[in-house]
Image (cartoon, grey):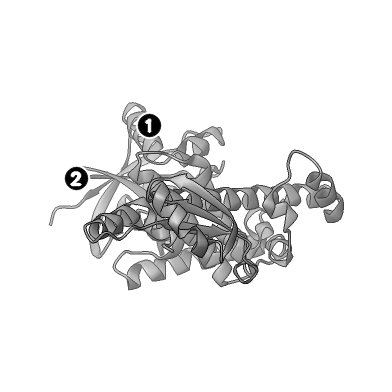
Amino acid sequence: MNRAARLRRSSVSVCTKLAHREVAVVDAGMSRGRGSMRDGVLTLFVGGDTEAVQEARWALHLYSNNIVHAGPIGSGMVLKLCNNLLLHSNRLAMLEVAHIAATAGLPREALLDAVRSSTGSSWVLEHWGKKDDDALDAGIGNHPFVDRTAREIRLALNYAKQLGLTLPATTATGKYLPDILTDGLPRHFGSAASAEGRAAALVQRNRIIEEFRANGGRLSGIRAAWEILLLTTIGARSGRHRTTPLAYQREGEDIFVFASDGGSDKTPDWYYNIRANPKVTVEIGSEKFEATAVELSREERDRVYARQVVRDSEYARYQAGTSRLIPVIRLREISR
């Protein structure tokens, strides 16, 4: 059985190469959790020619009591990807709901029992376990479960990009869920910005910077698809060099960064640094250069920001979530 990572393109490619040898191919993604294969009760999402799927059913039934023929070759992989996406989005939503309930003083079991019998129920709720409880506390740390979650979300985003689609909810899930599972939801989104939460954010930032520099500007895991640069500014008060990972937009020779701070009402410190000293250092990939930072006028800012929203719909949420106008900064390399 192919993995979801191969998706439709790989399945179709294999099928085409083997067709002239009179070898039929089906692709099958599996679901229903660990241990089910031994019992033969997996759900299989199968793609392929109807005749080929029928001929393969005897083998598929060794693993599954629920075979879903999704369509032509590659369809099984797409359906598996969609199923994964719903699973992870539901997990993030359920963790947020449980966080609300806990903050309001509602017992966890009361919440779970009530929702299980209502319209808000889901597989995540039905199988709520220790990992979920830990995610509402200190997290589960660096665990294969987090790596798998991040990988499957990244596959969904990459495939959507191939189709020309924008997935705002999936983008948000990929941005927040792996970190919540690793460090715990309260550390990132507690009712108050605790010192522990700020320390965790600094640790995460420093890990990104270290990985970026060690791998020529490439990141791994869910961050592999991120297009970021490192911006080093001089502290407006301290005079010390401060490095910040930032998403950017490139148009010709112009590079733009956005002082969004995730939609916070607080303008990020690096913005004040460039106001005081517009000479900065920029790292993109393995390239490093000095640049001048200039804030855009309102008209140009609106045009560039609208373009960024098209590229990443999270930026629409950032602006909608704050009363301040998010500044846009042009970084222009200083001629040598």
Secondary structure found at label 1: helix
Secondary structure found at label 2: loop
Kind of residue indicated by mark 1: Ala
Percent of width and height locating residue 264: 55, 44
Q: Residues within 10 Å of mark 2 (few under 14, many from 20)?
A: few
Q: Where on the picture, by quarter, is residue 308?
A: top left
Circle nearer the N terminus (2, 1): 2
Mark 2 highlights which residue?
Answer: 253
Percent of width and height locating residue 201: 55, 61
Q: Quick check: 196 above or below 161?
A: below
Task: Name the residue at 46% across, 39% down.
Answer: 315
Circle number at residue 306: 1
* Residue that extends furthest to the left in the rendered view of this protein: 336
Percent of width and height locating residue 130: 73, 66
Disc number lying in front (2 or 1): 1
Q: Quadrant of the C terminus?
A: bottom left
Circle number at residue 81: none
Q: Is residue 234 visible?
A: no
Residues 319 and 277: in front is: 319
Q: Is residue 158 left or right of residue 250?
A: right
- Between marks 2 and 1, how big is the CA–CA gap? 19 Å
Kind of residue indicated by mark 2: Glu
